[in-house]
Structure formats: structure tokens, C-alpha cells
Amino acid sequence: MTQERNITRIDAFTYREILSRDPIILIPVGSIEQHGPHMPLGVDTLLSTTMAELTAESIGAYVGPTVSTGYKSQQRSGGGNHIIGSFGFDAETVIGVCRTLVRELWRHGARRIVFINGHYENYQFIYEGVDLALRDLAGRQDPPRVMMVSYWDFVTDEVIAELYPDGFPGWDVEHGGVMETSLMLRHFPDLVRMDRVMDLPAAELPAYDLLPVDASLTPESGCLSSAQASTEAKGRILTDSVVEEMGRAILERF
Amino acid sequence: MTQERNITRIDAFTYREILSRDPIILIPVGSIEQHGPHMPLGVDTLLSTTMAELTAESIGAYVGPTVSTGYKSQQRSGGGNHIIGSFGFDAETVIGVCRTLVRELWRHGARRIVFINGHYENYQFIYEGVDLALRDLAGRQDPPRVMMVSYWDFVTDEVIAELYPDGFPGWDVEHGGVMETSLMLRHFPDLVRMDRVMDLPAAELPAYDLLPVDASLTPESGCLSSAQASTEAKGRILTDSVVEEMGRAILERF
Amino acid sequence: MTQERNITRIDAFTYREILSRDPIILIPVGSIEQHGPHMPLGVDTLLSTTMAELTAESIGAYVGPTVSTGYKSQQRSGGGNHIIGSFGFDAETVIGVCRTLVRELWRHGARRIVFINGHYENYQFIYEGVDLALRDLAGRQDPPRVMMVSYWDFVTDEVIAELYPDGFPGWDVEHGGVMETSLMLRHFPDLVRMDRVMDLPAAELPAYDLLPVDASLTPESGCLSSAQASTEAKGRILTDSVVEEMGRAILERF
Amino acid sequence: MTQERNITRIDAFTYREILSRDPIILIPVGSIEQHGPHMPLGVDTLLSTTMAELTAESIGAYVGPTVSTGYKSQQRSGGGNHIIGSFGFDAETVIGVCRTLVRELWRHGARRIVFINGHYENYQFIYEGVDLALRDLAGRQDPPRVMMVSYWDFVTDEVIAELYPDGFPGWDVEHGGVMETSLMLRHFPDLVRMDRVMDLPAAELPAYDLLPVDASLTPESGCLSSAQASTEAKGRILTDSVVEEMGRAILERF
Amino acid sequence: MTQERNITRIDAFTYREILSRDPIILIPVGSIEQHGPHMPLGVDTLLSTTMAELTAESIGAYVGPTVSTGYKSQQRSGGGNHIIGSFGFDAETVIGVCRTLVRELWRHGARRIVFINGHYENYQFIYEGVDLALRDLAGRQDPPRVMMVSYWDFVTDEVIAELYPDGFPGWDVEHGGVMETSLMLRHFPDLVRMDRVMDLPAAELPAYDLLPVDASLTPESGCLSSAQASTEAKGRILTDSVVEEMGRAILERF
Amino acid sequence: MTQERNITRIDAFTYREILSRDPIILIPVGSIEQHGPHMPLGVDTLLSTTMAELTAESIGAYVGPTVSTGYKSQQRSGGGNHIIGSFGFDAETVIGVCRTLVRELWRHGARRIVFINGHYENYQFIYEGVDLALRDLAGRQDPPRVMMVSYWDFVTDEVIAELYPDGFPGWDVEHGGVMETSLMLRHFPDLVRMDRVMDLPAAELPAYDLLPVDASLTPESGCLSSAQASTEAKGRILTDSVVEEMGRAILERF
């Protein structure tokens, strides 16, 4: 990256100059969650931050503090929070973190904010945090506009068709699968151990959740589909698709 | 209904007899939300309760208090909470209500509880309420098992293919559309005014949320797809599919 | 009822027309609570809603969503929350529900709101919910005025003297007694089983609460006084008194 | 007082000895609230503490920390929280303080706790605090039993007849009236200014609350009935009645 | 004291006159906490109130309600909350009490408020309560300015040198030591028992906290340093220093 | 680092093996806060994580997820939260994050946890989070022991004397000063711009806090003392001192 885009690595004086130019601020939202035997606990935090940084570079935006206090892993999208290695934060905490970020960025002068989600279960709690922050700011001068996205929603149908020739199982069961693993191979190859991938059939999960979780429904790997077909090249294609489409959507809206 | 299945219409002495037989208790979760010009604000509450009652009758279960304090309508699944007529409760309240229901039913002796959701936006907050209740009950004797479902997830692919010959748009944009309207025609015909249906194209919503909402993205009707093709017969087919499949899933699990 | 007065059975377009005429909105607040062997758990919810609907019809008001998440039954007014069949919600939840209703009705345009309580224990928590909502709306345009009543406070002394010739024991020990049972006989006769009334002496409760409850102080019936003398005619008299006096008070104030 | 009964004036070593003998601990609960032109803001705190101390002396109990964070003054029992001089704490705070006191006293070894309320509006929030504390302690060893009283509920009918020969208006409108003023004359004569009493007719308050308050309904004095007839002698009679009856009730129960 | 300065002993009419003159209001913040075998549990509450009253007299200010719901005693500043006799309130409660006091005093018309802390562990929670209150009042007319102090921070270096000739151990380990005991001897001699002082070496506490506490690290007395050298004369010197310096700081700022 | 010690870069299978050996887990706690014109917003997060990682390597421990949701910057230790660039999270959120981490690590099997604070204002809120987590786990099997430290408390007096030959101003005013800057030069030299250091006199801050902050009391740089004398060599000395002493303290205790 030729120019630093992540404000946590920028000093406050420069940050104030940036703020004076009405920047778009992208907030990555991840988790600390098991991703099988072949990837580290920080996958969602790493990938949401990377997607945000690349998009920021592409559209001239900046990246704010990454949220790593993700909501509890659920069985049908993350294997379940009973698994050792997943850190599940309460709704109240996830909401509170996002609410503060909006309020503080507004105080700093930001008026265009985008939450870029990288952990399936977070979405509704990001939404609530943003909604409460805007309620907090009701009647205050010049409240911000806030977009909320999950980065995988910008992978185009063409890319999906190309990367999943045998049919696309859905983003929910992509947990620890081809998409996340390919992206990690592309951006953090040192943190992936393809030799440890457990090539198991995709999870067959029912149309409901059960608590306490029936642990037998999650594959032994903790991944909901196999990462075997992952490649760095697929990670590149996915990245390009997300960065281009997500950037386009942000610019169209803001 | 030959035998009363809704405990709010049953006296406490009879309720205690029922509890002594280890019943399955179904909790409907709805909302008070605009559903266009042709259906009342209570649609989600009415339908989730009806689906629960019919399923209860079918499998010998009972229906607990209906939750009507639904989460905020979101634009991509309910038109948006800016619309007058939708009552959006905070995450904290939805979570608190569900959490209490689990705890109180457990105190009463119930050990098998199913939340039957009828308002798309509720799901994650039901989940959190259940999770917190189970944490509250950790270490207590004989904690309950809890299922969480959204009733439309039990409409079979066959029924979908039959009812949506031109392609199925997804349950999220079904808000105020053919499914809900047909079900209302089947169960509450007096509350539907087909002559007031606004036959507008389905909403074309982006892959993100925006707050404050861009109100222009929601069709003028407040419905995300047209209800024009709704019929009482479709409502019957949908009901049969849901009651059979949802009942089967509950019995298999419990 | 010749014209629908309950907004949960009214569509959003009609609701908006109603709102444009500055209506008075009545919010029933009940509970799910044991009411002895002869009446169902939903008594407080049913009666508060009916009282609200009849009063609405009488004075041209409308009825909003019924709150059924009532506060915990207390021994001296409801037998106690240890009894199986009573669902006791925490103060925080009751407060949150009422707070949201005021805030959402204000957003919709309502400026005159009345909470009509039908569960003795709720009152202080309704009050707090309203107070917090008005704090939320401080500085916002045109905040609402809110009345809070318990419907039995409008039974006139004449009616009390007529209906309780042997002396009136007080509304608190009326739980499951003559007033509630007569009202149920008047409005929901199918849900009352007079043959199951347990004709026990009125509870003699001390001048204090005790937690954990001394269960022996609550009559075996769960009712604090006998319902034996209940009749549909008394229910009619009580209804007329409440509807007339409560309606008069609302109109005088608003 | 010959022996110190208030633990805030006792050292921790002596306190531990007391605790080892399974004492009854009385917790006064007051407020900081306007009480007209003739009495100070601290009346409820002073009187609840004095009643607790005298009762403790009478029955060999001890007095714990006084709660002065009272709930909001309400118009029908305290004139209303709009009046300058009343400090109204949120339900959450009153609940939290009482909840902690039960939990901490239990940790110290206390198993018999009595809350002695001296501010009408507090009662339901004390109750909730106690209920939540007992839930916190569920499953822990030897949880406490807790009584909750308002001290005026122990004034006997005979005393009421003697002191209010023209008829008793009810404890709610006694705010700043004959009972509280007589008790203050008895116990804190230096803090009463009988020459400043405003001898106004008793407030005529409606059967409902209104928020925002209609300030015109509260007498100019802030008192709901006149204190003109107050005497130190009446304070003595009231004190004797309360201490004897309240003490008896506590001993009977504990 | 020639003129009453504590508003809890002042009537509401006089209080309103005071408020009309833009007074400085001092809020004492204490705790109920063990202070060894020679002093009562209420030390922090008594001393913070006395310091506030004397300072108020000195600078013409007034004293508001004393906060006695102190935060949990911590081992390195108060011996630890495991000790029987200490009442530790949760952060949430301490914050809520302080937040309300600011909000209510502002509603009454106060614009200059000072929190005078007398319990080491409270400080950060007072700060948060004030910060949240100011957020609550954002956009409201004429919000207050609030100072926060711990009274011992105004003891001058000269006084420290004089009173601690062998070296000053720091205010944190002064818990139950020479400063607090001397101040109690000066202002509440009846509540001090010098014959019960345990003359133990000062606690040697590590540079960290441990939970659960290692009880062996707190001296048997519960005091972190010996009170043996305490005298009424030292209490007088300390008082004079605090009242003068704290008063000066308040006047300079306000 | 020869072996990965940060669990966010370790896969879940390896993590489970680590957990089975009863590891010590170190949790860094930082902030996103202005640190003058010469250092980035993430200083506290970067340094607490680095100190934790080096200590982990030294004593064979592991590092858990870094907390970056730091409490509000206060003027006397961080310049004040009014400064653009500082993100101040509410007490509730900081507490909630730490509470969850303890609970989740316990669920994973960790029994020895150390919070390593790198942002002065956090400490009391970490403490509360840990205390509440241990309350949550009361009665559960094998609850954890938790240490809480601020890393600078392990710099020895010898090192202080060596590095601050003109006298040590205290860790609170070290914000953005010689210690933090030297440590950044040692570990993140690319993120420091010594040419941008503003060589201003140390802040002279009063013995109290004021809200709203008097912005004129914070030096223009946002730093409380000058970083001019910072060197990479000092950073090395400081690091060695902290890692050795902190490691020793942890091992002695655990």
C-alpha cells in the first residue's frame, strides 16, 4: 500500500487533516473464532480488515478501528459457540462497540461511515448499534449516514459460477471453506496450512437452531464445507470481485 | 380446534397437569409492523400464532404466550422502520422477553421449547435471548432444550416451485407478498382487503443496509413484492406444508 | 364493534389517516398470570384490551398494541410469582416495552397516549417506561402527553357498594375474584368455568412481602378472594362504570 | 440508645461478631425529596432510619446502610418529580442498590433481612431488587429470607382513628402532612419549622398519573395535605405504634 | 456551623432560593467499608461529608446528598472486597447514582457541581457518571460544569512532610491509617477506639491485583498501614490543609 | 519469535492442545487514542500486545485477543477525550469485553489469566469486568484466577533513575512521552516520526478533573510530556525491564 489508509497507524494530526476532507471511513468487523485445523482464530478479523483496506485504497477511503469482539458463533454459519477456540461476545457488547464507533467518528467529524462485516453472525448487532447511535445523535448537528455490508455479498454471480462449478452452497456454510481459505492464501499465506485441511463433506444442517447445540451436527473439522479446493488464484479473483463491487456500491451511495 | 392448545386460554390448574406430562411448548414470535394497504399491522403476530397452534394440534404440543414486541423492521426484509405503522423494539427488549420466557417455562417444568418466528428481523435476538437464558440456568437442575425456527423455512421446494412458477424471490422480500397474504386469506380473511393490493414490481434492494434509510428504495406500498397472486388456496397449501414439515422436524428432534 | 378500533387489525395506510387526525391512543397492559382454576392465564391481557376497546369506541379513540409482558405476580395482589402459570417479566423488560411504545407512537405522530393497566403489579413500571421515553424525547418536537390508569380505579363508589354489599376488600385482593370473573363472564364467557370456582375465604395477607414467598399464605386456588358471587350482570355493571368514567377522565384531560 | 445498632457506626470486627449470631438486619430506604416549606429534603431518609433504629433496639436487630437514592417522586404520593428539591433516581438505580445490599449482606453471613421503606414510590423497586438478588443467589448456600415493609403500614387502626378524628385520607397523600411532620417533631425537632407550614386543603388528585405532570394539581406547598395539626405527641404515638407492630411482625416472621 | 450548608437538612423553599443564586454544590462520595477494628464502617461517608461541609462553609457553597454506595474495596487501596464489613457496589450502580445527581441538580438549576471523593476506588466511576450525564444533557440549555476531586489530593507537601516524618507511603495504603484515623479523631472522636488499633507494619502489596484476592496479603487488621501515630491534632492540620486548598481550587476554577 | 504465542494466529486444533497443558493466557488491553503528531492512534494497542507477546515468549505463556476498545482518554493521563483521534468507549463496554474474555477463556479451559493493560484509564474497568466474570462463574467448576497489571508498573526504580536523570514525572503524564515513544522506536520504528515531535514543557495539570474539559490545559501536542529524549536504546532497556519483572511476577503468582 503506497499510502497508509488505516487510521490506527496514522497520527492524530494527520487524522484531523483527513477528517477535514469529509472522508469515507470503513470499519471492519470480525471475530475470534475457530476456523478448522488449517486456519487461525483471527480469520474474520484479518479478512474484514484486508477487504476494508484494499477497498479504501481503491476508492480513496480510510479504515477505522477493527472490531474483533464478534457475536457468538452459531452452528449453521460458524459451527457453534460450544467449540473451543471461538470467543462469543454478547449482543449487548457487539452493539455497544459499534454504537460507540459511530458516535465517536461523528464527534471527530466523519459523516460517511461503512461497516464491513466479515463474521456472518454479527450483522444484526452491527445494525442495532448503528441504529442506537443515530438515535443518540438525533437532533445533533449533521448526523452521519452509515452503510452496513457483509463483504461476500459483493462477489458477483459470475465469480461464484466460476469458483463453484459444482454449485454454490451458500455463504453461511462457507465457514472455513473455499472462500475464506482462498482469501487467506492470497493475503496471509503464512497463516494457512493446506496440509491440515480436513476434506469432509459439507455439513448437512437442519432448518433450525438448537440450544444447547447438538455438537454431532458440526463436522469434526469445525468447518461447514471443505477447503480442499482453495487456491491463491481463487483468493485473487474473489478479492478483485469484492473490492471492485463493494467499492462501486459505496461510491454510488456516498 | 377440538382441544384448546394455547395456554393463555387455559387455566393454571389444567396448565399444571399439562406440564406434568413433559409437553413441547411452542412460542410464537411476531411483530406489529406495516404490511401494506391490504393487511393489518398484526400480520406477523397472527400468522406465527396460527402456525404454532396448528402445529401444536398436529403433534400434541401446546402454545405459549405470543411475543409481539418484534425487532425493528429493516428495509431489505420489512420495508424499514421509518414507515409509520411499524413498531420497532430495541434488541435489548426482544432479547429480554425471550430470555424470560425460557426461564419462566423452565421454572414451570417445561423442558422442550420451540420459538416459532414469524418476523424475519427477530431471529438473531431470539437466539441471544435463548442463549442468555441457558446461561442463567447453568448449573440448575434439568435445563431445557430449545429449538428456534422461522416457519417459512419449512415450506418445501415442491410447494415453492408450485406457488412461484415464475421463480421464487426469497423469503426476505416476501414481506406483504404472496405467502403472507395467502396465509392471511386462509386464516383471517376478514382482515385482508385484496382490492387494496398495490400490484407493484418487487423491490430491487441493494446488497446493503443504509441508515438513515433511503425511503425511496421501498415501494410505495410498503410491501417488497406484489400480493396480487395471493389466494386462499395457496394459503392452504402453504399451511399444510409448514405444519407437516415443521411438526416433523420438532418431533424428530424432541 | 361497528368500526375497527384496534390498530393491530388496521392496515398501515388507514392507520396513517387516523394518525393525521391527532387521535387518542389507548395501550392495554396485561400479563400472563394464573387466575385460579376457573379462568385462563390471559385474563389481564384480555380484560385490559377489552376495556380499552370499549372505551375507544365510546370516546372515538384507538387501541394500540397490547402489552402482555406483565411484571411478576406479587403475593398480596396476584398470589405470588412462585405459582406455576404466572409469567413474571423483569422490571427492565416491562419498562423497556412501555418506553418503546411511547417513543414509536410519538414517531408515528401520536401526541395523546393512555396506558390502561389491567395487572396490579405493572403500574410503577409503566410509569418508569413513560418517564424514560419522555426523557428520550426531551428537546424533540412536540412530545406526547401520556396518561396512566388502572381500569378498576374508575369503578364508582356506587357500583362498589352495589356489588360488594358485605364490604369491599380492596382491588389488590380482587385477584381472580368477583370483579375479574364477572368481567370475564360478560366478555369471554367461554373462557370461564364457574363450576371450577374454589369458594375459599379471602386471603389474609400480612402487611409486608416476603421473598422467598411463604406459599402457605396464598389460598390453594391462587385467587385472593372467592369468585363465587360473580355474574355476567355484575360484569355488565362494572364494564359500564369503567367505560363511562374512564372515558370521561380521558376526555376531560385530553 | 444504649447500644449502637447502626452498623455504619460499628467497626468491622464487632460487626463480624454480630454476624456470627445470625442477626436480623434492617435496611432503611428513604429519598431526597421536597417536603414543603417546613421540613428538609431528607425527611424520608431520616424517618426510615429512625424507625429502623428504634425497632432494632426493641427487638435486638441491627440497622444496615440507609438507602437514600429514592425513586422519582410521583404526583399522587409525593407531589411530583418536576418540583425543585426532589431527586428522582431511575428504577434501574434503586433496584441496583437494593440488589447489591441483599447480595453483600448474604456474603457477610446475614440470613434475615428487612427493608423498611419510608418513601411511598420506592416499594416496587425494592421488591425487584430483592427478587433479582435472590435469583443471583439461586443455587448458592443458605440464601437469605427478606421482608419488605413500608413503616406506616404498621400504624394501627386505633391510632389512625385517634390521630385523624376527621377521617384518614390515606398514606399516599400523607406526604408532608400530619404523620411525617409529627414524627419529625418527635425525632428531629430542630429540622421542623411549624411557623412555615402552609395550611392548605388536601390535594384533590385524579385517579391517574399524567406525564408531563400538570403542575397545577399539586398544592403550592408541595405537601399533599396540611401539617397544621402535627404535634410531637402525635409523633410519639405514631412511633410507638410502628415500633411495636413492626417489631412484632418481624419477630413473628423471623 | 452557623448556617446550614447541607441541603438534605434544608427545606425545598429555601433550597430554591439558594439555587436562584447560582451556588456551587459539593457532592460527597463515600462508601460503607471496613476500616479496621478501631473505626466504623461509615468512615469514608462521614469524612467526605465533613470535608464537603467545612469547605462549603469556607467558600459559601452548599453540600448535596452524600453518595454512600461506594465501589468495591480493592486490596491495594482498601484491603479487598472479600472482607466482611465492606459493601461493594457494582460499577453500574455507582455510575448511575452520580449520573442522576448531575442530571437532577442541573434540572434544579445548579450549574457548578463538585464531587468530593472520600473512597479511593470510586474515582473512575464518578468520572463515568459525570461524563454520561453531560452526554444526556448535550444540546440542552446551559449544561453544568463539574469538578471531580479526591479530598486527600489537597493535603500540601508541607503537611505531608510534617505528618509523615518517616516518609509518606502514598494515599492508597492510607486506608485505615494515620490520615483517616486522625480526621476521625478530629471530627468523630466518639466513633474511634484508639485502644483497638492494631499496630501492624504497612502492607506490602504487589504491583498488581489478583482475583479472587489472596487474603493473606491484607494485614489482619484490614488496614493497610498502622493508625498508631494518629492524633486529633494531626486531624486538625489535615482538615485545615484540605479545606483551604480544596476551597481555593474550587474558587479558582469556578 | 520462533514459536507463535498469539492465539489469534494459531488454529483451533493447536489451541486446544495448548489449553490442555494449563497455559497462562495474557490479554493485552489497549485503546485507540491520539498520541501526538509523531505516533499513531494505535500505540496503546500495539505496545500492550508487544509486551504481552515478549513476556509470553519469556515465560512460556500465550497471548489472547487484544482489547482495543479502551476507556475514554482523561485529561490528566491521556490529554482528554475531547481531542479528535481518541476513541472513548463507555465503562459498560470495556467492562463487558473483559468480562466475556474471562468467561470464554474459562469455558475453553484456561485457569490462569493475566490482563496486561497499556492504557492508563482502563484499569478500574478491567477490574470490574474480571470481578463480574468471577461472579458469573461462582459455583461453577474450577473458576480461573486472574491477575491485572499495567505494564509500566514493572519498570524498575533503577531503570527509571537511568532513563529520567532529571526526575520522573509519573506514569500518568508519560502519555506520548519518552517511555511510549522509546518503546515504539524499539518495536515499531516505521510508525514513529521523531521529526514531528513537539518539544513542549510537561503539562501542568491540576489535582482534579473538569468536565467539560478545559482544553487549554492540554499541551497543543496532545502529549503530556515531551518525547524529545526518546531513543530506541531506551525502548530496549524499558522492554527488558518490563518483560523480566512482569514475567517474574506472573510466575511467582502462578
Image: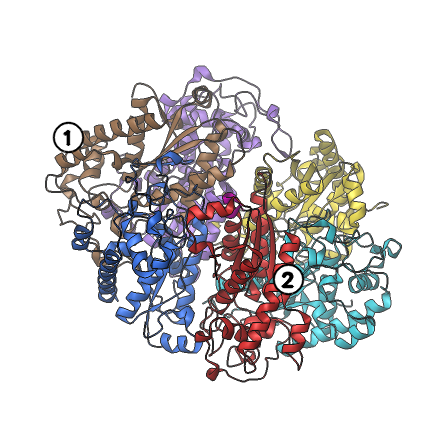
Chain colours: A brown, B blue, C red, D cyan, E yellow, F purple
Q: Position of residue A208 (x, y in %)?
A: 26, 56
Q: Tell me: F66 left or right of D155.
A: left
The segment highlighted magenta reads: C105-111
| x then y, percent, for residue C123 | 58, 61
Asked if residue A160 lies left or right of residue B37, the reply is: left
- Counting from the top left corner in percent of width and height, residue B11 is at 44, 75
Where disc 2 sits, the SS reads helix
* D2 or C227, nearer to the observer: C227
Residue F189 in magenta? no
What secondary structure is found at the residue carrying circle 1? Answer: helix
Residue E67 seen in render = yes
Q: Residue at x 15, y 39 (%)?
A: A194
CA separation in Å, label 2 and label 1: 73 Å
Residue nearest the viewer, comparing F32 with F160? F32
Q: Quadrant of the N terminus of chain F?
A: top left
| Left or right: B139, with B156 as reference point | right
Q: Position of residue E99 (x, y in %)?
A: 60, 44
> Which tag is nearer the camera, tag 2 or tag 1?
1
Q: Nearer the viewer, residue D245 or F32?
A: D245
Tell me if mark 2 has few (under 14), some (14-19) or many (20+) residues whose alpha carbon lies within 10 angstroms of its own: many
Chain containing the residue with disc 1: A
Disc 2 marks a residue whose amino acid type is Phe
| Residue where numbered disc 1 is placed | A233
On screen, residue D139 above or below A251: below
Residue C109 counted in the magenta span? yes
Position above or below: F106 against B206:
below
Chain of the residue under the numbered disc 2 shown in the image: D
Q: Which residue is pictured at 50% across the width and 25% down the height? A: F177
The residue where tag 2 is placed is: D13
